[in-house]
Image (cartoon, helix red, strand yellow):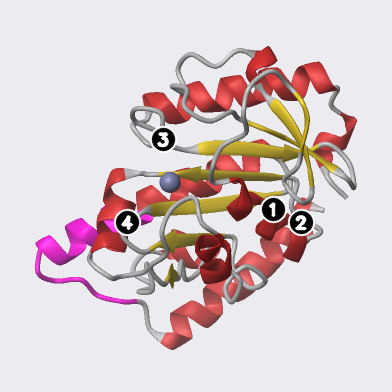
Amino acid sequence: MVDDECRTMGELRRDLCRFSRLLHRLGFMPGTSGNLSVRLDRERLLVTPTGMSKFQLRPDDMVIVDLEGRHLEGARKVTSEVSMHLTVYHFRDDVGAVIHSHPPIATAFACAGRGLEQMLCQEAVMTLGVVPLARYATTGTGEVAASLVPYIPGHDAILLANHGAVAYGGTLLQAFQRMETVEHLAQIELVAHQLGAARTLKQEQIKELHDAKARYLMNAQ
Ligand SMILES: [Zn+2]
């Protein structure tokens, strides 16, 4: 089900530290913002703690919670945004890792009330497709999870209005690559519009790219 299943607890703790530092360095998790989680098994998640810089995290700082978000192990308190993670795992059996961050350009789109819905570059079609915008919800409340529900089954990344983004995948690496792609697509859409000549792909071109993606996925198996 999940590639991370074969990784030990110690490796997963170190992976969370490694990707936290990477996301911090990219400017996606300034201050103490952002959070990451991985699925340990059918009942438990390993999650980053609240109130810490992602630059400073150590393997022992991680917290283990059950799928209701109840604290099971760890000296620290789990992130206040854990409900977002729980909801993604609840609706997607195939997901093994979730990342929430505030990448600046994608977050600016979310602050302007815009998802990444235009198919401008081929990469958008080949990777995430549409990245929808979930309605406004106050951080740390159950409203955030509720705002994501309509989009989780059909999308691998979602923008959160006036807040940030969430991306997920089978492994932490895949969730990270999707988050990286969200910011990349936002940057391209912004600049294409600044240039004043953004040209969206035609329906026929999108169909050809879907076919190319299907062939690519088949060969990759
Ligand atoms: Zn946030």
Residue at numbered disc 3: 33
Number of the front mark, 2 or 4: 4
User: Between disc 2 and disc 4, whose residue precedes?
Assistant: 4
For the residue marked with disc 3, what is the amino acid? Ser
Mark 3 Cα-neighbour bin, 10 Å: few <14, some 14–19, many ≥20 = some
User: Between disc 1 and disc 2, whose residue precedes?
Assistant: 1
Q: Residue at 51% of width from left, 56% of height from top?
A: 141
Q: CA distance from mark 1 to mark 4?
A: 26 Å
Number of the front mark, 1 or 4: 1
Whether the residue under disc 2 has CB within 8 Å of ligand 1: no
Q: CA distance from mark 4 to mark 3?
A: 20 Å
Element under disc 4: helix
Nearer the observer, 12 or 163: 163
Number of the front mark, 2 or 3: 3
User: Between disc 1 and disc 4, whose residue precedes?
Assistant: 1
Residue 127 visible in rendering: no
Residue 125, horizontal then vertical, whole percent:
49, 68
Q: CA distance from mark 2 to mark 4?
A: 29 Å
Residue at numbered disc 2: 219
